[in-house]
Amino acid sequence: MTAPPPAGPTQFGNLEANLRFISDTRVLQPGARILEIGSGTGTLLSRLRAQGVDVCGVDVNADLIAEARRWHGDLPVQQVQGTTLPFPDAAFDIVMSFDVLEHIPDSDAHLREVRRVLRPGGRYLIQTPNKWTNVVFETIRWRSVTRWRADHCALHSLAGLRRRLAAHGFRAVAYDVPVVNAFFRHKVHTYLGWPGGVLLALVNPDRLPLALRTNLYVAAALPAPTVAEGR
C-alpha cells in the first residue's frame, strides 16, 4: 500500500506559538522590512507574506528551500553558508529566528551579523529552547548525554541569553508565550511516549516562571537613533 501524500510541508517549529509571539510584540507595522533567518519549509514566511508583510528569508538547507517552494511558490528565500547574511548594512527593521540560535556554533558571529543588518531601533525576535529543560529532553530523545550536543551546540538559559545580547548592544525583553498546544503535545508523545503525557499532566510548562519555560521568547531591541543622528 502506498503512503498517502503529505498534508503540507514538514513542520519543525511551533507555528501557533511563534505567530502569537510576533503578534504580542506588535512589530508588523506598515512599511517594516523583515528578515527570517532559518525560514525552513516556508510556512511562517508564507503566512506573513499573505498578510502583506515585506519579508524575506534565508536558510542553510537547500532541500528545505526546495520544499518551501514546492508548497508555497516562489518565496523570497536565499541559501546562505554559515553566519554571513547577504544583505547590506541596516537593511531591515526586524530580524526573526525560531529554533535557530541553538544550532549556531559561533553565536557571537551570528549576533554581529544580525546587528549589522538591523537599522537603529530595530528588533531581533528570538525563540530558542531553554538550556535547563532542553538538556534533559535531548538526553532522553537521543538516549545519550553527548550525541545531541553537536546539533544543539549553543543552548542558553534566559539569563545567559540576556547577557549575550547585552554584549552586542541589545536590550532584551522576555515574553510569556504559551507553547502547550497540539504541536507541542505531539512532539512530547513522539519522543517521550506515554510518560511524556503524564509529565505534562503533572507539570504544565506554560505555568512555570519564564526562566524555567521549555522555550525562551525574547525580543531584543537596538538603541533608537538620537535626534541629532536622525537629522
Image: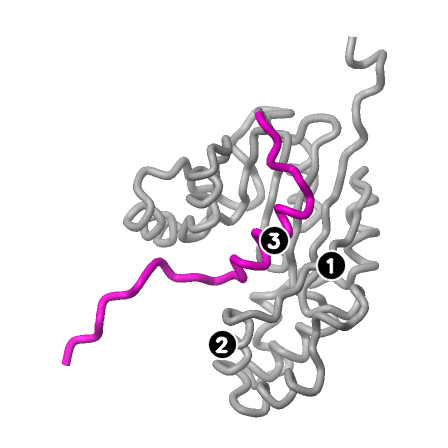
Q: Mark number for residue 186?
A: 2
Q: Is residue 24 magenta?
A: yes
Above or below — where is 28 with respect to 146? above
- In whole angstroms, how far apart are the C-alphas of marks 2 and 1? 21 Å
Residue most extreme to the top = 231
Q: Which residue is mark 3?
A: 20
Q: Is residue 223 left or right of residue 122?
A: right
Q: Coloured how?
A: one colour
Residue 216 picture quarter: bottom right
Magenta stretch, residue numbers:
1-30
Residue 188, horizontal then vertical, whole percent: 55, 79
- The quarter of the picture where the N terminus appears is bottom left
What residue appears at the point 62 percent right and 47 percent down from the top-left corner?
A: 22
Task: Characterize the magenta stretch by its predominant secondary structure.
Answer: loop
Counting from the top left corner in percent of width and height, residue 93 is at 64, 30
**Residue drawn at the location 57% of the way across and 51% of the way down:** 19
Q: Earlier in the sequence, mark 2 or mark 1?
A: 1
Quickly name the residue at label 1.
176
Measure how far apart labels 3 and 1 are at the Cα level.
10 Å
Task: Give the amino acid at mark 3.
Answer: Arg
